[in-house]
Amino acid sequence: MPLANTFVRANMDMNAVREVSLTINAAHLFVYFIPEAPEEAAKLGVTEHGPAYFAFRSAPMGAVPWQVTLAAFYNFSPRSVRAMAGVWDSATPERWQSARFAAVDRALQRVDVRLTADQIAEARSLIDPVIASADYAGKTMAAANASVPLPSDPLVALWQQITVVREWRGDAHVTVLAANGLGPCDCNVLQTATGHFPEAIARATRLWNDEEVAAATTRLVARGWLNADGTATDAGIAARERIEVETDEHCAALWTPIGDANVRRLTSLIMPIHEAFTAAGTYPFRVETGDTRSADPEAAR
């Protein structure tokens, strides 16, 4: 039985749930690609991308050992996360969180995100009840981010609330991946094979080596999800989509406090964040949103 079927199915339009999830992710994602982030990290004495990334993203959990970050992030190799050892000696998690907000603030101003004060307030009126009523059991990253005091700037504060919901779905996705027997390296290989994440970026950031990727590929071939050359089969594309659907079903209850119409309204309100960073040339690949996703196997390839 798929894991999501063990949860009470919320009476939500699943297309709206998928679209808001993709848009939430797109509105959050720029923090990993902006030049302001490594500049702020350098002020704290860290100039390598990997340790800075893990410090920024795991700061809400406090000064945890790298093994805890590895467990929470799931799809990274131990060798990639081990590089963050010592980041809490360079600065406290609170300073890393403040530096992250500073980078976000600078970047939002640089690309000139066109959200009025009224639009920001409306978006907060929709996303805040979702966060306040969410069930955080098993949602480590979401719970950690929900505990972070919001910054004074309204747009940066909205971005942090977006981050909470983004990490909530990520936590749910980890639960679904584990329930489907898709391990940390395997899910990376399937994601790249189905065209949802550039392989070069996955290999450079997750640091799974050739032997580990080959072993994951062998396991996925045995499941019928990959061909022997590592390309996705139709069954693999369908399996990847099924896992996303199960994650959506897990997330449906998250959005019931505001309902379908308000979910769609929130989606439209925050879309300009992604549009501004896309127009500024922030991303080296196409970011999926509700308008760009496709269930067509050939498009997925």
Image (spheres, rainbow, N blue to C red):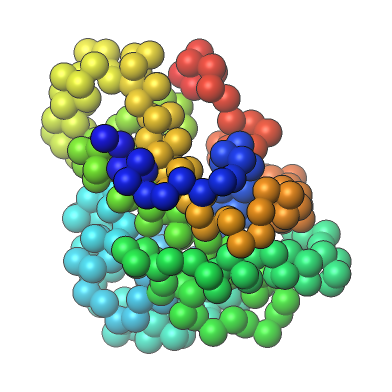
Q: Position of residue 76 (x, y in %)?
A: 28, 51
Q: Quadrant of the N terminus?
A: top left
State the image coordinates of residue 151 (x, y, percent, origin top left).
62, 82
Q: Nearer the viewer, residue 51 or 71?
A: 71
Quadrant of residue 168 within the rendered picture:
bottom left
In the displayed structure, would residue 240 be above or below residue 45? above
Q: In the rendered picture of this protein, how many numbered marks are placed on residues?
A: 0
Viewed as shown, does residue 151 lie left or right of 53?
right
Residue 16 vs residue 204, the one in the foreground: 16
Q: Is residue 65 above or below residue 193?
A: below
Compared across the picture, whether 190 is left or right of 133 comes to left
262 versus 22 height, above or below = below
Name the image quarter holding residue 130. bottom right
Residue appearing at x 68%, y 33% in the figure = 291
Tell me which residue sits at (78%, 67%) in the image: 122
Give coordinates of residue 208: x percent, y percent.
23, 42
* Residue 186, picture quadrant: top left
Left of 101 or right of it: where is 112? right
Q: Residue at x 61, y 62 (%)?
A: 257
- Tell me the residue at 45%/36% (across/down): 245
Query: In this orientation, does residue 120 appear?
Result: no
Q: Position of residue 6 (x, y in %)?
A: 32, 46
